Image (cartoon, helix red, strand yellow):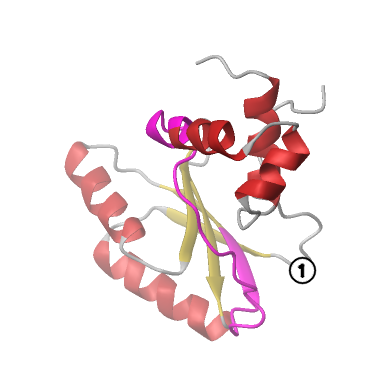
Amino acid sequence: MSLDYTDRTLLQLLQTDSTLSLDELARRTGSTKTPIWNRIKKLKQQGVIQREVALCDPDALGLTACFFVLIQTSEHDADWQRRFLEAVRSRHEVMEAHRLAGEVDYLLKIRVADAKAYDTFYQRLIADVKIFKVTALLSMEEVKYSTELDVGADG
């Protein structure tokens, strides 16, 4: 899909603050409301804009512990993978899950209240699926966090 400068600028603005009014978006892109509204509608229809959400502060919600969980499995059959993916996707503690190339098979990002809550998550996960090796890494400090993708609006 081809995005022009206005589309890219719109995406950059919306990723920073999706509550900007059509008037403000039009002003910042040098356009008017109707063409901006049409562009946003088109970007949604084409799947470029997947959804609009509110980002919550995990600390304010008591989810102060962030763990990165490295999972190695000796199982690679379709049934195991189906059960594992079902277990991971159904758990609200899992913020992200990635299947990897290399020694580690999966990487999970988990947000929980504390180490005890992580252990509860871990015990439930291994009760659901057989896992060869699990390594949990506690994030001591979040150095950078962003949900914004580089759309090249300023380049």
Q: Is residue 113 magenta?
A: no
Residue drawn at the location 67% of the way across and 54% of the way down? 17
Q: Quadrant of residue 67?
A: bottom right
Magenta range is: 42-68
Q: Position of residue 112 (x, y in %)?
A: 54, 76
Q: Is residue 44 magenta?
A: yes
Residue drawn at the location 71% of the way across and 48% of the way down? 24
Q: Quadrant of residue 50?
A: top left
The foreground one among 69 and 1 is 1
Residue found at the far top of this picture: 2
Q: Is residue 103 above or below residue 93?
A: above
User: What residue is pinned by disc 1?
Assistant: 140
Q: Is there any visible trace of residue 15 in the rendered image?
A: no
The foreground one among 80 and 49 is 49
- Crowding at label 1, few (<14), some or many (≥20) Cα neighbours within 10 Å? few
Quadrant housing the C terminus = top right
Q: Position of residue 89 (x, y in %)?
A: 34, 57
Element on which disc 1 rests: loop
Q: Is residue 106 above or below residue 64?
A: above
151 lies left or right of 92: right
Q: Is there any visible trace of residue 93 in the rendered image?
A: yes
Q: Position of residue 52 (x, y in %)?
A: 50, 53
Q: Which residue type carries mark 1?
A: Met
Residue drawn at the location 61% of the way across and 53% of the way down? 18
